[in-house]
Image: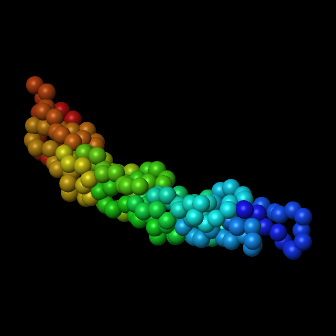
Amino acid sequence: SGHFAEQEGQSVCAKCPTGKYGTGTERCKACPSGTFQPTAAAASLAEHCTHCPRGKYQELSSSATCIACPSGHFSVTARGTSLGACRTCPTGQFSNVLEAHTCKDCAVGQYQDAFGRTSCKECEAGRHNPFPGRSFDTYCYDCPCGKWSTRGSNVCAECPVGQWRAGKRGTNA
């Protein structure tokens, strides 16, 4: 099995190509979309047409591989049959790898206000964000008088003794 004969009466059988399988009694059949088959001479659909794993999809039948979901996207289910199986990361999250199963929350000191991104934006100097997974720069709070922060901070620091900062958004002591 996993082979086929082009015509009756042949003395040798040909291997089914990658992406297909055969029982030996009929022509090779295509593995359906959402599956792949990387080796030649596969004997059956159940044994050799493998579902594309989470983070991947395959639109075409007779495929030897699956396609990775792009960065900024993720897939929580197997058997994806189109790019639509890869969902866009929501605001406040990102994915910087191919084949992601989930998106990651933006870290403290960061936010992301757009969908499908591969990184997060940092809060400006003089502002801070103590919470992960935030989706707008309004979650970057101004440092109060007497405190300051660098870009991407999650807390504001006290000004050193003998120094001060008046007003909002202090960037240094």
Specify whether residue 79 is in view. Answer: yes
Q: Position of residue 166 (x, y in %)?
A: 11, 41
**Vertical relation: 157 (above or below) 127:** above
Mark yes or no: residue 123 visible.
Answer: no
Picture quarter with the C terminus = top left
Question: In the rendered image of this protein, does residue 18 appear above or below residue 33?
Answer: above
Left or right, 82 with respect to 163, comes to right
Judging depth in this view, the residue of 36 and 121 nearest the camera is 36
Tell me the residue at 44%/50% (across/down): 96
Task: Locate residue 107, reporting x and y percent.
Answer: 28, 46
The picture quadrant where one finds residue 26 is: bottom right
12 w.r.t. 142: above or below: below
Picture residue at 37% right of the left edge, 55% below the top: 102
User: On the rendered image, what quadrant is the N terminus found in?
Assistant: bottom right
Residue visible at 57% across and 64% down in the picture: 46
Of residue 69 and residue 147, the one placed in the foreground of this image is 69
Could you say where residue 161 lies in the image, as x and y percent from the top left?
A: 10, 25
Q: Along the horizontal axis of the image, is 119 left or right of 69?
A: left
**Residue 109's x, y, as percent?**
25, 45
